[in-house]
Amino acid sequence: MRPIGSWLFGRIADKHGRKKSMVISICLMAFSSFLFAALPTYEQVGMAAPFLLLLVRLLQGLSVGGEYGAVATYMSELGLKGQRGFFASF
């Protein structure tokens, strides 16, 4: 899901700006992490539990793809001239 997230949030960043893309991807990560913590157990919902877990993890992967590209670009812009590659390498 990370490549799909990079593509999707890259398009959002191109059209609406990197800040909006970052805010959306961070909110999606926070929401999916909350859902991960609130998932019911197998005893409570049966076979729906692994399916819900898979969906939440897919959402997390999607948001990671969006965050990584925007953060790498942002860090390279913050770096001093001559050190931009170093800052973007993390």
Image (cartoon, rainbow, N blue to C red):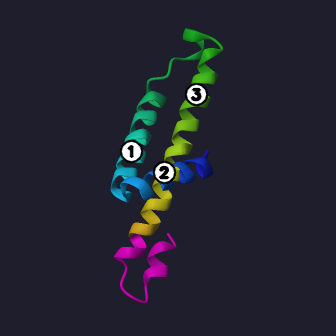
Give, as a three-letter code, the residue at label 1.
Ile
SS class, disc 1 = helix
65, 38: nearer the viewer = 65
Give, as a three-letter code, the residue at label 3.
Leu
Disc 3 target residue: 53
48, 26: nearer the viewer = 26
In the image, residue 76 lies in the stretch drawn in magenta: yes
Give, as a three-letter code, the residue at label 2.
Phe
Disc 1 target residue: 24
Q: Residue at x 56, y 53 (%)?
A: 7
SS class, disc 3 = helix
SS class, disc 2 = helix
Disc 2 target residue: 9
Where is residue 15? Give x, y as percent. Answer: 42, 54
Q: Of the residues under marks 3 and 2, which one precedes in the sequence?
A: 2
Q: Crowding near pointer 2: few (<14 within 10 Å), some, many (20+)?
A: many
* Magenta span of residues: 75-90
Distance from disc 3 to disc 1, alpha carbons, whole Å, reads 21 Å
Q: Residue at x 44, y 36 (%)?
A: 33
Is 23 left or right of 50, judged from the image as shown?
left
Where is residue 34? Give x, y as percent. Answer: 41, 31
